[in-house]
Amino acid sequence: MGLKKIVFALIVLSISVTGFAADAENKESPASTGISSPSDAPSYFEGVWGGKWPWGVDGCEITITVGKRNKNGLFGTSYSWESWRRRTGYPIQSGSLKTWGKDQGDQFLLEWKNKEGVKFSITLVKGNENSVKAIFDTDGTFAIRDKTDRVTTLTRKK
């Protein structure tokens, strides 16, 4: 191998090493550039949350379980409710459903449609280390009298 080829190879090598070092030193953290967290980073919302909607005679006990993030960035989520009675006395059966939720920074959204195609959603809003505000919404009619009845606080269960 000739001396010119060796010198050329050393110059190319030194340029590529210097370029890499400069990139590493100037690199900003993902948070400061607005880039979302890596897909394998845990979400604040992962875990089991429990509380009560202020509905009916005595309220409606609920549990929301948020699983791990999948490769598409979605979280397997389950929502269950205990039986309760409307203020008119009409009984509502307990139930549960499974859906996908998505982390949106300080909020977590889960949505589903009923058999009639009406869309429902619950938005969790980050609170302190062990609580979230839950907001229930629907595109259809809902027998809840007041918008304040669609908001409650859930706490993290251990």
Image: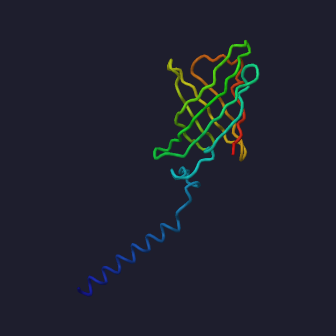
Q: Is residue 113 left or right of residue 17?
A: right
Q: Is residue 52 left or right of residue 122?
A: right
Residue 115, percent from left and from top = 50, 20
Among the 4 quarters of the image, the one containing residue 55: top right
Please tell me which residue is depicted at 63% across the width and 36% down the height of the picture: 64
Please tell me which residue is depicted at 56% across the width and 59% down the height of the picture: 29
Among the 4 quarters of the image, the one containing residue 77: top right
77 vs 129, nearest the viewer: 77
Up/down of 39 relative to 95, above or below: below
Report the number of discs.
0
Q: Residue furthest bottom?
A: 3
Q: Residue furthest left?
A: 1
Q: How is the image coloured?
A: rainbow
The quarter of the rendered structure image containing the N terminus is: bottom left
Please tell me which residue is depicted at 54% across the width and 46% down the height of the picture: 68
Up/down of 157 relative to 20, above or below: above
Up/down of 52 relative to 115, above or below: below
Residue 70, percent from left and from top = 49, 45
153 vs 158, nearest the viewer: 158
Residue 114, percent from left and from top = 53, 22
Q: Residue furthest top?
A: 88
Q: Is residue 153 left or right of residue 139?
A: right
Residue 98, percent from left and from top = 54, 33
30 vs 70, nearest the viewer: 70
Please tell me which residue is depicted at 58% across the width and 54% down the height of the picture: 31
